């Protein structure tokens, strides 16, 4: 399976590379705005250097692929409209239009938990400390974005659904399949504990620090669980639009993983309670 | 109450003018891309001539208002991305940003039934002929847009919710209130029966003609019910984001009106079965 990965060398992209690059089932093409650091771990990887706001570049990159994992975009909740407009609104339009033209089999779209961020704002910090919360959000709950970034991602989800449900794909036996993954925070994902919380923003013994640690234990998705979820999205044959939340099997989670379990066979191995000492 | 009406001289805007202009409770300011026909019914109305894609013009127009009814936009489902991008995506951003800066009390946003259009596509034409359908869509069902136009409106709804839930409004006792009305088809609304269906697109005795008539009886909102719904949105004091479907009390409707009834006291007087001979 030929797979185009946009935003390849970000923290989410590298989790995919680390766990799936050597999988014989995939032949990856990496696209990023910059060449990888030539002395770094990915320095020798061939890279398409392009901005996803450039529709022609994205179309060319998608032409001979079977699938696309679209991670590229502006990733922070403090973004203004101008920050998210080109990378996230236009970039996602370009990615989907390229996928439609190339009649890809599957697209995985990096959405965000911030499309639901207001549910968290309303219930924090108590939410972070419950392990048996009655509060559980699924793909069926209405979006409540907490930022322009969150709005740009809910836009992306609606556009994905449109590209699944409205177009015909003459070369394919069925419509394009698109999974929207509501990723954890870009700043905090995948078990890089020392970097994530202990970055000087909070005092070690402050309430805020304790809250951020507790939050991470609820929101965490380990790098291997994330790569496994991507793998399941790519391998499952289903022509619908689906939304999944990117979380491990965390005791404290408030995002449901049941839909991913039932639909794509997501079987997370990790639990946010182990976040302080993640595997691998 | 000072109210800015954008897209004033379109078919929806004129329903508001016809029913509410002389209401002593409102002092309207009309904004449109063009001056009204000077020989027409609205020829003498003072008009701010501006495009909603011009953020400065919208901000100036909103400055001294208490409320805004934002109807301006590209209204057709055959629109390309380029058709909807400036008027609907950027135009709605500008309208909401102007409302936030002016700290308006209320905004009514013209969304569309096309944010839910795929439910209809899947069930048509059978859907049009049932009067006791078990199929009923509410504001809580996930959006399934049928067009770039539909996606632009679901984007607008998400952005509205963001402006209600995320900002503080220091001058107000509570947050801005925004009602999103999922309007009927722009081509067919409000009982202009001869024009709407009998425009030469379908033969009088064809199945397609019969389907369009039946569809209208399900989708119809009379001009007076529409204006009444706008009036109720403006007069109800509630600080939340709400979504209502613009339909009369049609026997054949599949869009729920219960939420509007319960929340803003919407009491439609008309029924699509009378669409062939509408009141007034």
Image: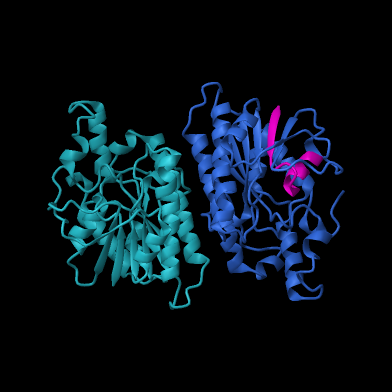
Chain colours: A blue, B cyan
Image check: A219 left or right of B76? right
Where residue B41 sits in the image (x, y, percent)?
Answer: 14, 54
Quadrant for the N terminus of chain B in the image: bottom left
Q: How many marks?
A: 0
- Name above or below for residue A101 compared with residue B33: above
Which residue sits at x=69%, y=63%? A132
Where residue B38 sits in the image (x, y, percent)?
Answer: 15, 53
Image check: A87 left or right of B273? right
Residue A242 seen anywhere in this rendered image of the structure? yes
Which residue sits at x=25%, y=37%? B214
Front residue of A140 and B53: B53
Which residue sits at x=60%, y=66%? A121
Residue at the top extreme of this rendering? A171
Residue B239 seen anywhere in this rendered image of the structure? no
Front residue of B215 and B151: B151
Where residue B104 sits in the image (x, y, percent)?
Answer: 39, 70
Residue A13, magenta (yes or no): yes
- Name above or below for residue A211 compared with residue B227: below
Residue A40, magenta (yes or no): no
Which residue sits at x=59%, y=60%? A117
Res. A38 image quadrant: top right
Front residue of B212 and A140: B212
Question: What segment carries the magenta color?
Answer: A1-18
Where residue B169 sits in the image (x, y, percent)?
Answer: 47, 73
Res. B171 image quadrant: bottom left
């Amino acid at each position: 399976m030929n797979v185009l990965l946009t935003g390849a060398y970000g923290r989410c992209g590298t989790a995919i590379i680390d766990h799936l690059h050597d999988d014989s089932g995939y032949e990856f093409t990496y696209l990023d705005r910059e060449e990888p650091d030539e002395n770094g771990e990915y320095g020798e990887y061939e890279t398409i250097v392009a901005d996803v706001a450039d529709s022609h570049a994205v179309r060319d990159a998608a032409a001979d692929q079977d699938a696309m994992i679209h991670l590229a975009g502006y990733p922070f909740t403090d973004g203004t409209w101008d920050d998210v407009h080109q990378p996230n609104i236009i970039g996602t339009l370009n990615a989907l239009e390229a996928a439609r033209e190339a009649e890809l089999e599957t697209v995985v779209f990096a959405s965000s938990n911030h499309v639901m961020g207001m549910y968290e704002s309303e219930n924090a910090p108590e939410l972070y400390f419950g392990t048996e919360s009655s509060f559980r959000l699924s793909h069926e709950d209405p979006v409540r974005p907490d930022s322009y970034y969150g709005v740009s991602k809910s836009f992306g989800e609606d556009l994905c659904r449109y590209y699944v449900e409205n177009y015909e794909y003459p070369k394919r036996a069925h419509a394009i399949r698109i999974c929207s993954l509501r990723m954890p925070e870009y700043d905090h994902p995948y078990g890089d504990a020392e970097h994530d919380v202990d970055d000087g923003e909070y005092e070690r013994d402050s309430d805020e620090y304790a809250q951020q640690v507790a939050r991470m234990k609820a929101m965490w998705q380990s790098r291997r669980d994330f790569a496994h979820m991507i793998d399941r999205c790519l391998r499952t044959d289903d022509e619908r639009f689906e939304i999944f939340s990117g979380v491990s099997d965390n005791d404290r989670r408030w995002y449901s993983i049941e839909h991913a379990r039932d639909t794509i066979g997501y079987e997370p191995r990790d639990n946010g309670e182990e976040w302080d000492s993640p595997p691998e």
